[in-house]
Amino acid sequence: MKLSIMQPYFLPYIGYFQLIAASDAFIVYDNIKYTKKGWINRNRMLRDGEPVTFSLPLKKDSDSLDVRERELTADFEPEKLLNQFKSAYRKAPHFTGTWPVIEEILRHEDRNLFRFLHHSIVRICSHLGITTEIRTSSDIGIDHSLKNQEKVLALCGAAGADLYINPIGGMQLYQRGEFRANGVDLRFLRPKELIYPQFRESFVPWLSILDVMMFYDPESLHDFIETGYNLI
């Protein structure tokens, strides 16, 4: 069984969804510390030909809390972010087909950060035709005090995985020998370069999946998610 594990991210880049599609099961961490300078509640989109950051506003709280313990601000107004997206992408070729998905995600009523992000990931996977089982880390019976590689190996064991797939950026975090000793093959997913027409000639790579869905036709996007990577 092929397994991958990641933090939840808000409208992440295409490689995140390739990782999900490459797996039989995908575990989303909810009992993991929220990182202020990471990408959990923010990402980048294209506006006037330049990459700009967008984000979900969070209620002020302790930096030691897990993602599942954080909340969006009570005065979060989805329409403000939707208006930013509409202003940036209303003339994109696949705006009409993508917009209802984005509206559904932003208008999700749950203000818990993890549940809001989990809903967005599941909804985009459905839109992209990804049928991988998506599980939540705290629902899996392991010692959740474990850290880093030990926790991943415990999750692999509990899930019955014989292949663990990690993003290419994590090559320095894990040792293949340790995985082999636990009966698990370790592979890393490297996305192939994807260049598609945006509004201007100069292409801006690695933006939110929002950008890809707005400019790339759905059938070709599904094919690229399924095949546009190498496992090393």
Image (cartoon, grey):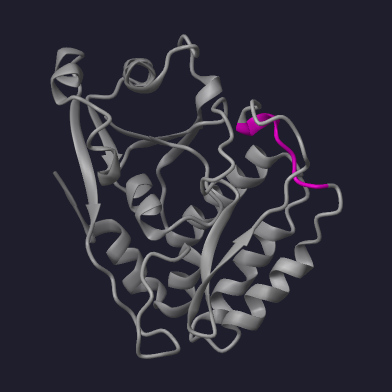
Please identify the quarter of the rendering in which residue 23 is found: top left
Dividing the image into 4 quarters, which one contains the C terminus? top left
Query: Residue at the location (23% across, 61% down)?
Result: 228
- In the image, is 125 to the left or to the right of 20? right
The image position of residue 13, as x and y in percent, is: 42, 58
Q: Which residues are magenta?
A: 67-73
- In the image, is 109 to the left or to the right of 16? right
Q: In the rendered image of this protein, does residue 156 appear above or below residue 119? A: above
The residue sitting at the top extreme is 143
Please identify the quarter of the rendering in which residue 178 is found: top left
Q: In the rendered image of this protein, does residue 100 appear above or below residue 104? A: below
The residue sitting at the right extreme is 75
The image position of residue 216, as x and y in percent, is: 39, 77
69 in magenta: yes
89 in magenta: no
- In the image, is 34 to the left or to the right of 93? right
Q: In the rendered image of this protein, does residue 10 appear above or below residue 89? A: above
Query: Residue at the location (36% across, 72% down)?
Result: 219
The image position of residue 156, as x and y in percent, is: 33, 21
Dividing the image into 4 quarters, which one contains the N terminus? top left
Which of 62 and 55 lies nearest the eye of the viewer? 62
* Number of numbered discs on residues: 0
Q: In the rendered image of this protein, does residue 97 appear above or below residue 29? A: below
Query: Residue at the location (40% across, 43% down)?
Result: 132
The image position of residue 144, as x and y in percent, is: 49, 14
Which of 219 and 138 lies nearest the eye of the viewer? 138
